Amino acid sequence: MSLPAPPARRRQTAWRLLGAVALAAVLGLAFWGYLSPEMSIHWENLAALCGF
């Protein structure tokens, strides 16, 4: 019988899962934008918004 994970460990796992979902969403959106010409993203503008 296993004991439940401590709260800090569960919180870390939740953040890691949330980060993986967010990364998958961003990569999926970027790939979709790459394939569809009507959803073209100007990467220079996106980089400027991020401060690069």
Image (cartoon, rainbow, N blue to C red):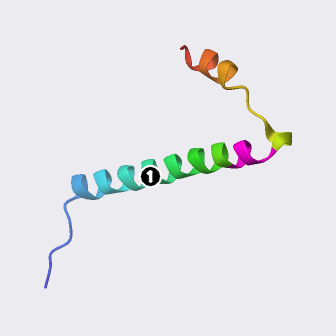
Disc 1: CA contacts within 10 A as few (<14), some (14-19) or many (>=20): few
Q: Residue at x 74, y 32 (%)?
A: 41
Quadrant of the rendered structure where residue 33 is?
top right
> What x and y, as percent, mark residue 36?
79, 46
Helix, strand or loop: magenta stretch: helix
Left/right placement of residue 44 relative to residue 9 reads right
Question: Is 22 located above or below residue 47 in the figure?
Answer: below
Residue under label 1: 20
Q: Which residues are magenta?
A: 32-36
Q: Residue at x 69, y 19 (%)?
A: 45
Left/right placement of residue 22 relative to residue 10 reads right
Q: Nearer the viewer, residue 3 or 18?
A: 18
Q: Residue at x 29, y 51 (%)?
A: 12
Residue type highlighted by circle 1: Ala
> What x and y, as percent, mark residue 11?
31, 53
| The furthest residue to the bottom | 1
Q: Nearer the viewer, residue 28 or 17?
A: 28
Q: Residue at x 28, y 59 (%)?
A: 10
